[in-house]
């Protein structure tokens, strides 16, 4: 059958958790046996979300096919355990770029290009193609921004049109709103939700379901009031209260009946629900038996979402070990060789995540040196891996001016650099290795962890480790135990006679799942717990 569509919009304020609501619904529908696809429509004009500052939008989540996308795609993948493609990420920049290219090719035959129908048709086409390509029974599409935003208007108009094109019972509109509680008055206010729905209805969209974000439980009277004034069915007002963990949200929304409501609106047959594995992992998260202290050393720690997938991958490993991770976010700009001990002592493990640029690089180098010298479990990823190689060359080979050309373009000893064949490529994305690629592992700790000779992981790197340092470092016990299958670039390092000292140029955090934790994160925490 053709896909049915669920559209998730937001109102009142931003950052309400539309992405988590959409991802949770995806999990609940999948637990009923339906094949689900997910998509995010972002109203900003950027063409490539991967070029946005992590301090503005958080991490750029990388898909299997090498597209850098909004971090909500990470939530979608982790909750539904489905690998998404780049077409799951739509931005206004991508939409307008496509339209302009068509116009320049003469496809509009000299006609005036307008928001309606050309922009809205492009949006609808991207939504329907992504759903068809996925083979999904139900496609869930989150519309970024807030109702009333000028930037979101074309997307809202597009989904309004789509409802009538595919049939009313093939679409379901979910509106996520804030339900503020005035503690001084002891009163919950429904008026902001009413005004938000009024704005949505003014552009021709009547929500079928209202999901209310709230700090305190919603009374039956409040739900009935919202249903009456917002013209939705009694029972179609759903509470989404604050939870101690994201992974409890699907269970809370299941109790509220969200998935059953959506199935009724889409005229789908009721189905048995299997959420036992999800209940178990949520319970393990809430009842840890031990704690482990981990330091995350990075340059974007001012916004924790910049390392969201790393933090979530640590959570997945913690669930597997039935422990609580107490994560400290340490700014690499504030760490040096002189103060590393004062900053890093007392932690059970240290992780150096991805990044780019020269700012804060020496702090990551210092952290890598300290962890190696003091036998502290250490896990370096992407940019962190590259700077850990710099640290090893300086310490073990005594080449003190060794560096990455990303940090020091004029360094006399470039141990990390852009390969010559990529230097002349102007487009930074085409010059990078992006998406899922194969790595061949040699005997060692990492191969034992994976239990495979060849693995496939997601990449997002322009710079590579220079092969000239491979043999000299190996003599010092710093071994590169994985190379890319296609071009034999060093991919993985490990340190002999160390509890856990591993670096990967790829990003394992992007394929970790709460019910399928990545083995490297599991092994890292196991070492930290020793």
Image (cartoon, rainbow, N blue to C red):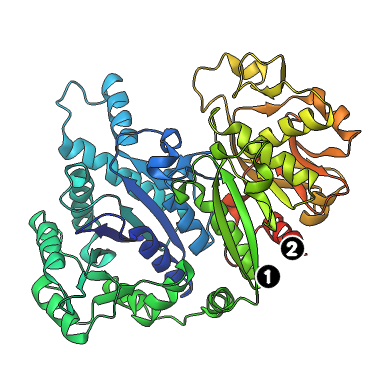
Who's the residue at 77% across and 54% down the image? Answer: 450
Instruction: Identify residue for label 1.
Output: 321
Label 2 SS: helix
- Does any portion of residue 94 appear in the rendered image? yes
Q: Residue furthest bottom?
A: 220
> Is 244 left, or right, of 225 in this rendering?
right
* Res 122 quadrant in image: top left
Instruction: Identify residue for label 2.
Output: 526
Q: Position of residue 109 (x, y in %)?
A: 21, 22
Nearest to the observer: residue 357 or residue 231: 357
Label 1 Cα neighbours within 10 Å, binned few <14 / some 14-19 / many ≥20: some
Q: Which mark is residue 19?
A: none
- Does any portion of residue 486 appear in the rendered image? no
Q: Which quarter of the rendered picture does the N terminus lie within? A: bottom left
Label 1 SS: helix
Tell me: residue 221, above or below residue 113.
below
Q: CA distance from mark 2 to mark 1?
A: 8 Å
Tell me: residue 285, above or below residue 356.
below
Who's the residue at 46% across and 73% down the image? Answer: 248
Disc 2 to disc 1: CB gap under 8 Å: yes
């Amino acid at each position: 059958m053709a896909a049915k569509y669920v559209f998730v919009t937001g109102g009142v304020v931003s950052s309400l958790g539309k992405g988590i609501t959409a991802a949770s619904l995806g999990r609940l529908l999948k637990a009923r046996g339906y094949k689900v696809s997910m998509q995010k429509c972002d109203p900003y004009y950027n063409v490539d979300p991967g070029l946005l500052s992590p301090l503005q939008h958080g991490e750029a989540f990388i898909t299997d096919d090498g597209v850098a996308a909004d971090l909500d795609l990470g939530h979608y993948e982790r909750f539904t355990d489905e690998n998404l493609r780049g077409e799951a990420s739509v931005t206004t920049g991508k939409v307008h770029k496509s339209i302009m290219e068509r116009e320049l090719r003469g496809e509009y035959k000299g006609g005036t290009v307008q928001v309606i129908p050309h922009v809205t048709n492009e949006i609808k086409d991207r939504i329907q193609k992504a759903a068809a390509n996925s083979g999904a029974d139900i496609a869930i599409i989150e519309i970024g921004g807030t109702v009333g935003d000028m930037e979101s208007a074309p997307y809202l108009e597009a989904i309004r049109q789509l409802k009538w094109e595919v049939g009313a019972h093939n679409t379901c509109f979910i509106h996520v709103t804030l339900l503020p509680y005035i503690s001084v008055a002891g009163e919950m206010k429904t008026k902001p939700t009413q005004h938000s729905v009024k704005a949505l209805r003014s552009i021709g969209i009547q929500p079928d379901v209202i999901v209310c974000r709230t700090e305190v439980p919603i009374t039956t009277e409040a739900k009935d009031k919202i249903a009456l004034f917002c013209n939705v069915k009694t029972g179609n007002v759903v509470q989404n209260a604050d939870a101690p963990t994201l992974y409890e949200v699907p269970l809370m929304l299941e109790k509220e009946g969200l998935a059953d409501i959506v199935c009724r609106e889409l005229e789908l047959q009721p189905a048995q629900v299997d959420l036992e594995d999800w209940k178990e992992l949520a319970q393990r998260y809430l009842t840890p038996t031990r704690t482990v202290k981990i330091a995350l050393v990075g340059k974007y720690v001012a916004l924790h979402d910049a390392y969201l997938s790393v933090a979530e991958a640590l959570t997945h490993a913690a669930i597997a070990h039935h422990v609580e991770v107490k994560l400290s976010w340490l700014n690499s700009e504030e760490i040096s060789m002189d103060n590393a001990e004062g900053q890093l002592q007392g932690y059970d493990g240290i992780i150096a995540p991805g990044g780019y640029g020269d700012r804060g690089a020496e702090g990551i180098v210092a952290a890598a040196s300290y962890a190696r010298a003091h036998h502290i479990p250490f896990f370096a990823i992407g940019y962190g891996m590259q700077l850990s190689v710099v640290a090893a060359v300086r310490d073990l080979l005594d080449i003190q001016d060794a560096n990455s050309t990303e940090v020091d373009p004029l360094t006399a000893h470039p141990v990390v650099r852009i390969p010559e064949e990529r230097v002349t490529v102007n487009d930074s994305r085409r010059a990078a290795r992006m998406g899922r690629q194969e790595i061949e592992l040699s005997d060692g700790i990492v191969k034992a962890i994976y239990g495979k000779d060849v693995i496939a992981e997601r990449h997002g790197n322009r710079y590579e480790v220079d092969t000239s340092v491979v043999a000299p470092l190996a003599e010092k016990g710093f071994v590169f135990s994985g190379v890319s299958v296609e071009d034999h670039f060093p991919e993985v390092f490990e340190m002999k006679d160390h509890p856990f000292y591993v670096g990967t140029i790829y990003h394992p955090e992007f394929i970790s799942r709460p019910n399928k934790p990545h083995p490297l994160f599991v092994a890292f925490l196991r070492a930290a717990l020793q």
